[in-house]
Amino acid sequence: MNEFVMALGWVGIYGPMALGAIGSVIGCSLAGQAAIGAMIETESGHGRYVGISAMPSSQVIYGIVVMFTLNRTVTPEAAAGMFGIGLLCGLALMFSAIYQGRSCAAAINAAKAKPEIFGLSLAPAAIVEGFAVFAFVFALVLSADLPGVK
Amino acid sequence: MSRDAYITLITSLPYAGELFAVSQTPISRIQLEARLSFLTPEDATRLQAIEGLLWWSSHSHETSDAEIVMETKRLLAELKNEWLRQLIRQRMEFRTLVAALRRRRRGEPAPDLHTDWGFGRWVGVIHRNWSEPGFSLERAFPWVLEANRLLREEDHLGLERLLLGEQWRTLDQQGEGHYFDFEAVVAYVLKWGIMDRWSSYHGEGAVRRFENVLDDSVGEYAQMFV
């Protein structure tokens, strides 16, 4: 039983990074496809479309930071907490990256038609980013209370 | 084709804008066809079938009403997507109502219910209320009385404007919630068709074309009347 709990602890350590990476892969791909489409249609502003499409990459960075924060000697006492925080934070980061990618794709599509709303069209993506930051910050706060901090 | 694969295609299409504010389509047919090459062969075939059914220009003058109704039923049976089926049903019902208005304007009696002259839920209602100005369908089609008036006054451009505007509005409504999917592509292409039709109405061009046709027809006999 202890081995299983310990394994969950390791899942908790690597989970935020892996799930954040999966989310960023999908999110950047979605927004990147929109950027490519917009580049076919427009004559200028290509750089900013590519820039927007990179927005969902922040989640993997948050995941890496959480991974290092949770990285400690896995003990039966700490493993369950590490699993809970790591997995749930990873899921939050993954979904936020995917949906931020969709928001970015919509923003690119809208900004292509109406360049004057470029800044405002990014607001939904920024709000989604805010929720990812919540998940990230509170994962750091809670991980400080887990036993076995290095 | 996965849902996300439509993102590149949709974002590569220019903004459709407002129907009556444009003097030409935002993208030429050749360019549109090039962008639509992103579609899988299956989606391209589906789109072609829908466009072929819903645009008059794709039917020959010899195509009978019954053949179009049969084609509609065949396509509806083939399509699994409920949104597309609903789109086709609504457009064919719209066309049935416009056809009824035109038939009545020509002084024809109510069509025989046993013939496939129209499609959809309202064929029987139209038949029963043939003498009513709006076939008692004002609630379902609030524009029908206005269309009847324009037809009576022979304001053909006004009627066309009303009908195209209604089709555009319906596509806008149906397209809500569809941003990066096949439904959005279909809505865009159908809107493009409406814009193409509206932008092709050009008064001076029509007069010029009429004169050219007249000159060609009269030809060498033109001198006879000088």
Image: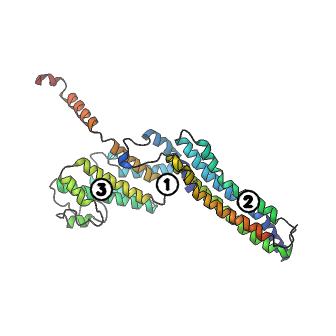
Amino acid type at image mark 2: Tyr
- The residue at which mark 2 appears reads as A62
| Residue B121 % position (x, y) | 31, 66
Nearer-N-terminus badge (3/1): 3
Q: Residue at x 43, y 43 (%)?
A: B26
Chain for mark 3? Answer: B
Q: Residues within 10 Å of mark 3 (few under 14, many from 20)?
A: some
Residue B5 visible (yes or no):
no
Contact check, label 3 and label 2, Cβ < 8 Å: no
Q: Is residue B171 above or below residue B34?
A: below
Coloured how?
A: rainbow
Question: Can you tell which of label 3 and label 2 is closer to the viewer?
Answer: 2
- Give the tally of numbered discs: 3
- At label 3, the amino acid type is Arg
Give the side of residue B32 with respect to residue B63, left or right: right
Q: What percent of the width, then of the height, locates residue B28?
A: 43, 40
Say if labels 3 and 2 share a chain.
no
Where residue B209 sits: x, y (%)? 26, 33
Residue drawn at (33%, 41%) of the image: B200
Give me the disc on residue B182: 1
Say which element carries label 2: helix
Q: Circle 3 — which element?
A: helix
Label 2 neighbour load within 10 Å: few <14, some 14-19, many 20+:
many
Residue labelled with disc 3: B95
Q: Quadrant of the C terminus of chain B?
A: top left
Disc 1 marks a residue whose amino acid type is Phe
Residue nearer the viewer, B31 or B207: B207
Labels 3 and 1 within one chain: yes
